Image: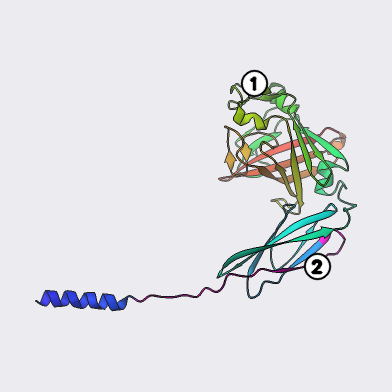
Amino acid sequence: MTRIITGLLIATIAMYGCKEERYNLGNIPTPDFEVQAGNDANTLVFVNKTPGSSIAYWETSTGQKFKGDNVSARFTFEGQYDVTLTAVTAGGTATVTKQVSIAQSDPTACNADRPLGFIAGCTEKVWMLNPEAGAYKVGPSPDNGEWWQNTGDDVTSRACEFNDEYTFVFNAEGTFNYDNKGDFYADGYLGAGSSGCEPNSNLPAAQQPWASGNFAFNVVENGGVRGFGQLTVTGVGAHIGLQKVHNTGETTSGPTANSITYDILEMTQNAGGKGYDILKVGVDIGGGTWWTFTLRSAN
């Protein structure tokens, strides 16, 4: 009998000891923001006006991203752009998008000391892999070839890579053209997977987007690991350097992302007084691994 009573007592205490707790985390925010003029005709300031306390995240249709209650963004070309504010509170997350207008194009955007001007010039600019050792390399940090990099001999054996042209056009659409001249270096995974050059006709359907094509690009200033900005190429198959390399790893079967973003690591005008420019970009593929590609201007 004692055991039964004890058991009932414990059960009763346990039953009354359980209480439903209710917590009020607050309401889902109602995001809002104000658009103010910047310090010139191509800069706008966005001010978070969401009621209460919130963390503000911003993104423009040009690819610029910011965090903070008061941020400024620069727009290169005349036109309309979308600006999205995401407000985060204890009660949840909500977004609002507004359209802003820019009345004139930035007259300094194609200057060579600006990332867009350096990459695309004032009309268009053609780039090729720098025909030297270390044009593409992989290592634990940007511009590091500790694990592997091409040799000087690869410039000849991989001639079908070093003749590829990457053309960036200075326009509001951000036109990017990749021309592989009808062939590619198979590198063990492209086409028939040989260790040599093969024609585009060898590419299976899943890899065909990696062949020549017209895509788009965008340059964001003052970002990336070196602070020079970032270059994003957009469109299935768009890439710089090796086809398999993207922002979350390496994929050999075919392109898996609609865009790839490269950090700008170096922009050198008239490198060594030789009449060409050098553009160095890197991509963090995750797991502490960086691929770096060095391009030389062809015009």
Q: In what element is the residue under mark 1?
A: loop
Alpha-carbon neighbours of circle 1 within 10 Å: few (<14), some, or many (≥20)? some
Magenta stretch: includes residue 95: no
Name the chief secondary structure element in magenta. loop
Of labels 2 and 1, earlier in sequence is: 2
Instruction: In the rendered structure, find residue 126 and report the number of the disc placed on it.
Output: none
Residue 27, above or below 269? below
Span of residues in magenta: 19-43
Q: Nearer the viewer, residue 263 or 124?
A: 124
**Distance CA(mark 2)–CA(mark 1):** 56 Å
Answer yes or no: do the residues labelled 2 and 1 have beta carbons within 8 Å?
Answer: no
Q: Quadrant of residue 150?
A: top right
Q: Which residue is tagged 2?
A: 36
Q: Is 143 located above or below residue 15 in the figure?
A: above
Q: Is residue 49 above or below residue 114?
A: below
Which numbered tag is attached to residue 196? 1
- Please tell me whether residue 22 belongs to the stretch shown in magenta: yes
Name the side, left or right, on which 126 lies relative to 151.
right
Residue at (56, 73) in percent of width and height: 27
* Residue 24 rendering spot, x and y as whole percentages: 50, 75
Instruction: Give the residue type at disc 1.
Output: Gly
Q: Position of residue 156 (x, y in %)?
A: 72, 22
Count numbered badges in the picture: 2
Q: Amino acid at mark 2?
A: Gln
User: Badge 2: few (under 14), some or many (20 or more) residues near its Cα, within 10 Å?
Assistant: few
Going by the image, does 245 lie left or right of 78? left
Residue at (63% x, 74% y) in the render: 53
Look at the image and tell me in which quarter the N terminus lies: bottom left
Foreground tag (2 vs 1): 2
Is 139 or 229 nearer to us in this picture? 229
